[in-house]
Image: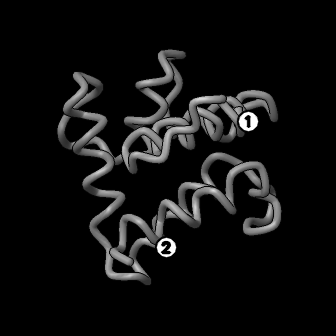
Amino acid sequence: MNHASALGAFVERLDGRARLFTMSGSYGEVCAYLDGLDAATGGGTMRAFGAWINGRGVGLPEWVWWNLVLADLGTGRRSRDLASFTPEQHAEAIAHLFRLLREYLGTADPAGAGD
């Protein structure tokens, strides 16, 4: 199993259960967890994920992937705004992150489960 497919399998376990893997289940904590998992297992997948989002015409090439996800969401929010996110805004950003990850990893759920 390659690194990307291992991450894809883990995405299925993490989606909807962020509080099991993070302190508060916030968008920033989920992103930090995914970055740590990526680094601990060889790295590169999340950086490539960011390049993929940027290739869709979102954001600037120097932006990190977690900002690109927020830009793709189209709300005008950025990671510098995380402290003021409501629980609903965190949940919206996390749901969008997992939709994009599934699309990137080729594991999109046609039924929309996990939304």
Going from N to C along the chain, the mark reached first, 2 or 1, is 2
Quarter of the view holding residue 72: top left
Q: Is residue 74 above or below residue 93?
A: above
* Residue 49 horizontal/vertical position (percent): 32, 49
How far separated are the C-alphas under marks 2 and 1?
20 Å
State the quadrant of the C terminus: top right
> Percent position (x, y) of residue 114?
71, 39
**Looking at the rendering, in which quadrant would you find the N terminus?**
bottom left
The residue under label 1 is which amino acid type?
A: Ala
Residue drawn at point x = 22 percent, y = 22 percent = 57
Residue 96 horizontal side relative to residue 3, left or right: right
The residue positioned 49% from the left and 73% from the top of the image is: 36
Q: Position of residue 45 (x, y in %)?
A: 32, 62
Name the residue tied to disc 2.
36
Q: Residue at x 65, y 29 (%)?
A: 111
Checking the image for residue 55, the label placed there is: none
What's the colour scheme? one colour
- Secondary structure beneath dot 2 equals helix
Q: Residue furthest front?
A: 110
Q: Which residue is mark 1?
A: 91
